[in-house]
Image (cartoon, rainbow, N blue to C red):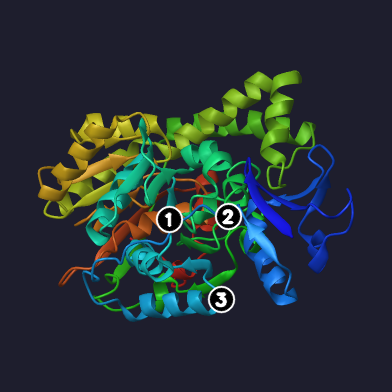
Amino acid sequence: MLRLRFQDGTLLVREDTLPPRAPLPARLEEFCRYDARVQAYRANASAYPPILLRLHREGVPYEDQARNYQRLDSPAPLSRTPRFYQQEALEAWRRQEFRGVVVLPTGTGKSFLAQMAIGTACRSTLVVVPTLDLLAQWALQLRSAFACPVGTLGGGSHDLQAITVSTYDSALLVMEHWGNRFGTLVVDECHHLPGPAYSQLARCCLAPFRLGLTATPERPDGLHQDYPQLLGPICYRKEITDLPGETVLAPYETLTLPIHLTPEEERLYRQAREIYVDFLRENEISLGSPRGWGNFLRACSRLPGGRQALQAYLTQRRIARSPQEKFSTVHQLLTAHRHDRTILFTADNATAYQLGNLFTLPVITHHTRTQERMDFLEGFRRGDFPAIVTSRVLNEGVDVPAANVGIVVSGSGSVREHVQRLGRILRPSPGKTALLYELVTQDTGETYTAERRRMHPAYGKPAAPC
């Protein structure tokens, strides 16, 4: 009889009556490799479902010593009626054998869909999230939806329960020991999962039921092609433009505001830009290639003029991101929207703190302590602060209610980042129209950066210049 056992994030498959290296029955070699150290076949723990399915189809008897997850108590009744797309997504996930990635815009209730999926699978569940803010947010929601205890892993907490919420980093650390404790794996913001590190947490988990959630599944490195192996293929997808109506997402406008450099800023920008570009040309480095940035940094560290070129790059970028006119434009916008709730987005902490000091606004960066961040968000929710400044930490997942105006002071060329920032202001409320302003410094590298990040259906209509 075949025996299946979980060991260190892998699945051991052994047939005691067969001699070492003998072929396994049911053609399991496609999932396993022989490990001479233990004289057994070994597979990724994630191969557990297809291996069991193959054994059932072939009628091969086996003893399952690997699985250690349990059935959940029945969930509490749903707190609200699912929206049509949430029900469609759940059915699509069912049809795809309870495996797959659901793509929905920010603010459309992906966490509520996950509650529906967890209740459907009714197995011990691990929910993986990228940040401590999301860890607290998910735990609170799940505790109100399920009768069983909800534990957390991360931020100093190490509480394993029938339903557990973990950060990516904490899950990666414990999965080789606890990867057989969960029958359902839910991965929030699952575009982080593919890659050499985080993908291991999916491969070390037995869970037959898998659900990935994201608003932006594609990755620049192409590793989104690994979703079928890690979670299952995309089973349902809706973009911002597919969900009109005030009950789903607020209607919105995107406005591009051209910013100009002062004569002195332009002189310094051109001077730094020339040094930086000349270095690229002399050393035949193309930043548009997949390894361009790494090649540039390596060249800066070892070639003559490299340190000067790197400093010039940083100088021209700083000037483009934070010229004087941007700050005066932000002042005009904050004055015009003084009765609205506004989020100011920057690409770096220095600009964020500069804005916070200039306009006496709370600033949230990755340096902000958890309690302080919660206090700022609660004050923003109550209306104590009409605006809040953030570098990048509010791009993803965190519920920022009531915000209806976004000001992108600076940002990267990432389409994902730009879509996430738009999503922060789209939570619906009666009569709400969201506005996203984008400040773009003309005749600088920011113009090209802004064009790249707008390559998404949400920005299909031309930006209205002001």
Q: Residue at x 24, y 77 (%)?
A: 81
Is the N terminus in the top left, top right, bottom left or bottom right quadrant?
Answer: bottom right
In the rendered view, does 94 fall on the left or right side of 115?
A: right
In the image, residue 247 above or below residue 366: below
Q: Residue at x 50, y 66 (%)?
A: 456
Residue linked to disc 1: 125
Q: CA distance from mark 1 to mark 2?
A: 11 Å
Q: CA distance from mark 1 to mark 3?
A: 19 Å
Is the C terminus in the top left, top right, bottom left or bottom right quadrant?
Answer: bottom left
Residue linked to disc 2: 206
In the image, residue 283 above or below residue 81: above
Classify residue 426 by image quadrant. bottom left
Residue linked to disc 3: 96
Q: Amino acid at mark 3?
A: Gln
Query: Is label 1 in contact with label 2 (beta carbons under 8 Å)?
Result: no
Q: Is residue 247 visible?
A: yes
Q: Amino acid at mark 2?
A: Leu
Q: CA distance from mark 3 to mark 2?
A: 18 Å
Whole-percent x, y for residue 388 in the image: 23, 42
Instruction: Decide which of tag 1 and tag 2 comes sooner along the chain.
Output: 1
Q: Nearer the viewer, residue 87 or 417?
A: 87
Q: Residue at x 58, y 31 (%)?
A: 313
